[in-house]
Amino acid sequence: MTHESTAVQLASASSNAAASTGWWRDAVIYQVYVRSFADSDGDGVGDLRGVRERLPHLARLGVDAVWLTPFYVSPQADGGYDVADYRAVDPLFGDLSDADDLVRAAHALGLRIIVDVVPNHTSEQHAWFRAALAGDPRARERYHFHPGRGPGGAQPPNDWESVFGGPAWTRVEDGSWYLHLFAPEQPDLDWEHPEVAAEFASVLRFWLDLGVDGFRVDVAHGMVKAPGLPDIGRGAQATLIGAQPLPFFDQDGVHAIHRSWRRLLDSYEGPRIGVAEAWVPTSERLARYVRPDELHQAFNFRFLNCPWDAVALRTVIDESLAATASVGAPTTWVLSNHDVVRHRTRYGSLARARAAALLMLALPGSAYVYQGEELGLPEVADLPAEARRDPAFLRTAGQDGLRDGCRVPLPWTGDRPPYGFGPGGAWLPQPADWGGLSVAAQTGDPHSTLELYRAALELRRALPGLGSPDAGPLAWLPAPEGVLLFTRPGFACTLNSRATAVELPAPGRPVLSSAPVDTDGRTVLQPPDSCTWWAI
Ligand code: NOJ
């Protein structure tokens, strides 16, 4: 199959890109959590054919690209982030021809496809780890196997804890221990071993040859560990959203890997891109992942973690823009994903979620939209324990496990579960009151969140001052406490984070608003928890 012609078509189809070589600089990329998007075969689990059948929803929404979470062969100990075969599709999700069909169908609609790559760890079922467990000493060198400490080596080699709770080490039959920063079913690879780098270069080529437009790099900050695997000391353990320096995250050595991947990506017609999932302490550390010879994007999790507070939001925006500008990269904004509580629930209301979305989509750079946020879905907080699948929930006796509530299958149509998700049920129970949130119910309703996102993305394509990092600066104008007001060329954005309406000078003509605005052309009464876009 040839994908060169597709790449050319896509370059001309992308009216949103500042230049055809930089489509990703202001792209809106939609995250599909495959098992919860759409189920074509009735087993209750979303699959690749389901995604393909629902692509028209994404084209109509107006996104530029789609990121697919892992669909590779996996025992599913961590929702597919435990990969047993990086070059094959898990039968749960289809087969390779379904992946190929999906890439072609997306390209035909002008949508690019980004797939996940999981290089920090494999599944315990991967052939390499099975060989390691079978006692092959050379196979063990691809992972972190070490003797334990204390009498009889009964204590783990160091004090590291798993992100999912419990020790980051598991002991095997012969008494040695292996490292897993996540679940025991996810042994960490040793990237010092040359075969590891060679294998992943080959895996990337496999999917690039199939036509994908890029990779979301899982745990892009974790592949290299500090020499000697030093103890952390009491009180400073791992979390997915960690802020402190850790000997297994954000080590300088990871950047050599990303440079080599950039060279590989650049050797393909494209551009094909890499986006880093890197939970690092500061915007400056994050910017290092998007230096000109490294990856193209890095999720801005500081923005995702920012409270609903005008000062905090402005600070994060300024510091993020400054940090990425210092390396010549755009910022990559994100409010939600499959690992965090949905932002409607985090922020406490749909009004704020809608306002936050307009704020994000007004900022210069690219933005990621997590499936269901365009429907204003809330977190499902009351899932029964027996339905939950998050290893963090299972490993911490129910104390943690925030990640199933944002993964509940999407409502497409109808007034009762599974709301058109598929011909069978749904792998996580959907709330009984989601009928009004379905795609069908919201389509055509001018007040719906879905129509708000559609209108926002259409405007983003029409107005370069929206989104494009190359269109000109972002300038803050004076505003009352709790209010943000900024301009970009031809465009202004007002956000009121307060619980009461506030009167402001109208910066122009309103073109979109998360809540109805009342303006006489000179002043505007900006509603509580709202954001408005203005043409100026
Ligand atoms: C980040 C992924 O987003 C998350 O879902 C997964 O559990 C960890 N990385 C481990 O792969």
Image (cartoon, rainbow, N blue to C red):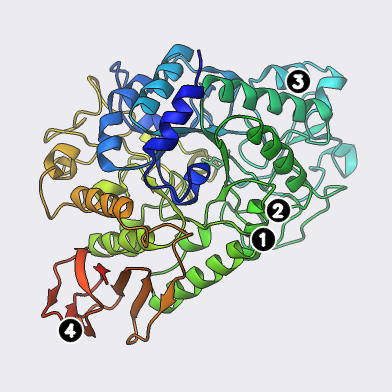
Q: Quadrant of ligand 1?
A: top right
Q: Are marks 4 and 3 in contact (CB under 8 Å)?
A: no
Q: Are marks 1 and 4 in contact (CB under 8 Å)?
A: no
Label located before the other in sequence (1 or 3)? 3
Element class at badge 2: loop
Q: Is mark 1 within 8 Å of ligand 1?
A: no
* Three-letter code for the amino acid on which mark 3 is drawn: Leu
In the foreground, 478 or 357 = 478
Residue with the mark numbered 4: 523
- Mark nearest the camera among 4 and 3 is 4
- Mark nearest the camera among 1 and 3 is 1
Which image quarter: residue 43? top left
Q: Are marks 2 and 3 in contact (CB under 8 Å)?
A: no
- At a point 33% along the width and 33% down the height, the residue shown is 428
Residue with the mark numbered 2: 250
Mark 4, Cα crowd under 10 Å, few <14 / some 14-19 / many 20+, is some
Disc number for residue 59: none
In the foreground, 301 or 61 = 61
Mark 1, Cα crowd under 10 Å, few <14 / some 14-19 / many 20+, is some
Q: Is mark 3 within 8 Å of ligand 1?
A: no
Label located before the other in sequence (1 or 4)? 1
Depicted 477 relative to depicted 409: above or below: below
Residue with the mark numbered 1: 285
Q: Are marks 2 and 1 in contact (CB under 8 Å)?
A: yes
Residue with the mark numbered 3: 133
Query: What is the spatial separation of the Cα atoms under label 1 and label 4, in whole angstroms?
Result: 41 Å
